[in-house]
Amino acid sequence: MRPVSEFWMFVADKWWLAFPLFGMVMGGLGAAHNRKEIRARRRHREKLELLRAQGGQLPPAAAPPSAIAPQPVDRLTAAHDDVTHRWLDYELDVSKLIAYPAMSDGRQPLTAAFLRAKKVADNLRPAPGETVTAEQLKEYRDAVTDYEVAFDVAERDARRMKDTAFSDAERKRLDTAKQLLGVAIDQAATPHERQLAYKRVREELDGLIWLSDAAVDELEKKVALELPRERSTPAGPEPAV
């Protein structure tokens, strides 16, 4: 038991040595940590230099601040498509064009402004998967906003005007075309009646409303539809047994 007692007597007498020893230990740990951090920085710097030497491509964390994630672009293209679909509701529906002819009349200032805004937005629309800069994104966002506003203004004006831009005789032709259009797409009418009505619709609208090829195709598809009709077969004589 004597050696143990002498050890604790030494510790009690030399307790002040704990502070420099503790400092030496912490200093050694700090130096080791610093050396580890220096090596990590050196490896990171060497990796960047290697990437530059291979083609100048940096990892995503070091990418230029102008690079934009695709999510904002997706939202803008969705808004862009929404306006286009709203426009196509008029462009492809002859009945709507008869009711609101200004939507197809490029001579109307507001319609012309909308069509110009559409062209700008279409030209600035990024291709799928294309990475855009902050400046390109802003330019496209502004174009989509202009497109939305221009369409809303043109639509409100077309609904306000209706057929007021036409003479009395021209309005009568539009009314006739509207009535004939109902026959042309009436699935209860005979194919001959529908084809005849369709031909008259085209004649009445000629020179009044311009129909795009896509609108004509859509209308012809509706005219060609025909519901199957059940035909009653007269009862014949019973077969002889």
Image (tube, helix red, strand yellow):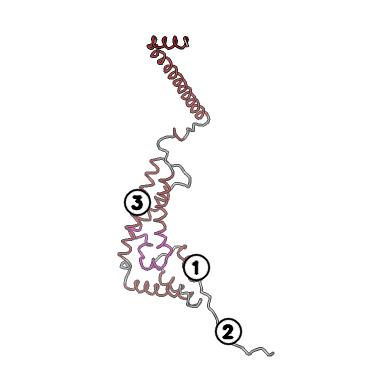
Residue closer to the observer: 17 or 161: 17
Magenta-colored segment: predominant secondary structure:
helix
Q: Are marks 3 and 2 in contact (CB under 8 Å)?
A: no
Is 95 inside the magenta-drawn segment? yes
> What residue does disc 2 label?
233
Identify the magenta region: 86-111
Instruction: Residue 27 in the image: state x and y as whole percent.
Output: 42, 16
Q: Please determine whether, in this image, residue 27 is positioned above or below residue 171.
A: above
Identity, as a three-letter code, of the amino acid under mark 2: Thr
Quarter of the figure with residue 235:
bottom right
Q: Residue furthest right?
A: 241
Tag 1 and tag 3, C-beta contact below 8 Å? no
What percent of the width, then of the height, locates residue 32?
A: 46, 19
Q: Amino acid at mark 3?
A: Asp
- Determine the secondary structure under disc 2: loop
Q: Which mark is residue 221?
A: 1
Q: Is residue 239 left or right of residue 220?
A: right
User: Was residue 107 drawn as part of the magenta stretch in this picture?
Assistant: yes
**Would you name the residue on which mark 3 appears?**
146
Residue 223 relative to residue 95: left or right:
right
